[in-house]
Amino acid sequence: MCSLGEENRADCSFWKAALAAAGETDGAAVTDIASGAAVPWSGNALGLVDLAFTSGRGAPRVVAVIGAAGAGKTTLLGSWYLMLSRGALDVASHAFAGSYTLSGWENIAHSLRWANDGGPGFPPHTPSGEGRAPGMLHLALRRGDHIIEDVLFADAPGEWFRAWSVNRDAPEAEGARWLATHASVIILAADCEALAGPEKGNTRMTLQALAQRIASERRGRPVALAWTKADIEVPEAVRTSVLTAVTTHLGEIPVFEVSVKEHHATAPEASFVRLMNWSISAPHAKTQPALERIATDDPFMVYGHA
């Protein structure tokens, strides 16, 4: 419907004027256009069938936040959005240039806002229904050279990743496999609250299994470790054990600490900014198929592999 209140957009004077300016004056055509789908998205999180039109400017960067259930993955995305919406997210000389999923961002960030009946909370657990595709949240960012880059952030349930870490081909891990195949950068979330609690042993084993699975699927892509809920102190022995397991499988990778509360005298905003900057600026390693032989009499082949 018309945003000014008309139930049918064909009754809106501004809609008619826009069509007339475009050379469309036939009243029947106005009705046909108004009755059809105006845009190929709804504003909510994108599904896999919705991604084709996001590639019109080029292949979007896909940021996969991987971790167990309750590790703070959705809270991380919601915090980024709230900071961006109030101008507190200075993203490596990138400026906000639009989003196809503003409603989707609002759905996960709503719980983080202050409300009249109490303070902010945390987003609800991301569900993991059978056959569900990862919800993709979109941002368009304009670089300093005015080129627009599309970035997709995956909001996926931790149950997928746990199943994927145990069995790559598990039926319930289909969404995790898609992300492992298409992600441009990967963030492994380590839940400090769980690592400091009574289930720290299981949490540590899950992180080790995820690191091992990511290593086998990495294919040269950038990976970072993010300590989520970093305001909670993790026993030094546990922290060292996790870092040893991660570096054993993934080598030396960037490590970040994020929390919605102050920790180690670091403002929460600064930690989120650093991680976001890495997410959108880390170079995505592009692998070229190996050629068995280069024909030296073909100048294009020679110069192409010089």
Image (cartoon, grey):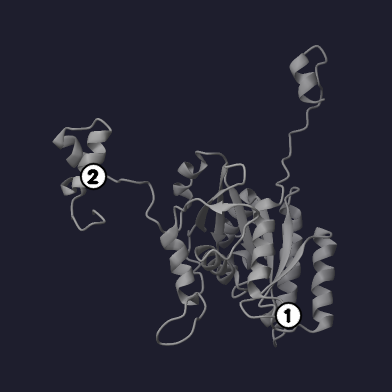
Q: Amino acid at mark 1?
A: Ala
Residue 301 sits above or below residue 53 on the image = above
Q: Secondary structure at mark 1?
A: loop
Position in image of residue 72 (x %, y %): 60, 73
Question: Which residue position is annotated with label 2?
Answer: 15
Quadrant (top left, top right, bottom left, bottom right) of the C terminus: top right
Position in image of residue 182 (x %, y %): 61, 49
Q: Secondary structure at mark 2?
A: helix
Say whether residue 128 is left or right of residue 25: right
Residue 88 sits above or below residue 59 on the image = below
173 or 211: which is nearer to us? 211
Residue 92 quadrant: bottom right
Say whether residue 218 is left or right of residue 273: right
Residue drawn at x 47%, y 52% as measured from the top left: 98
71 or 291: which is nearer to us? 71
Q: Amino acid at mark 2?
A: Trp
Residue 83 quadrant: bottom right
Residue 2 sits above or below residue 271 on the image = above
Quadrant (top left, top right, bottom left, bottom right) of the N terminus: bottom left
Q: Tell me which label, 2 or 1, sits earlier in the chain.
A: 2
Q: Residues within 10 Å of mark 2 (few under 14, many from 20)?
A: some
Residue drawn at x 73%, y 80% as measured from the top left: 265
Q: Is residue 67 visible?
A: no
Residue drawn at x 63%, y 64% as measured from the top left: 161
Position in image of residue 162 (x %, y %): 64, 68
Say whether residue 216 is left or right of residue 179: right
Residue 264 sits above or below residue 78 on the image = below
Disc 2 versus disc 1: distance between alpha carbons?
A: 53 Å
Residue 196 quadrant: bottom right
Residue 265 is tagged as 1
Position in image of residue 36 (x %, y %): 25, 44
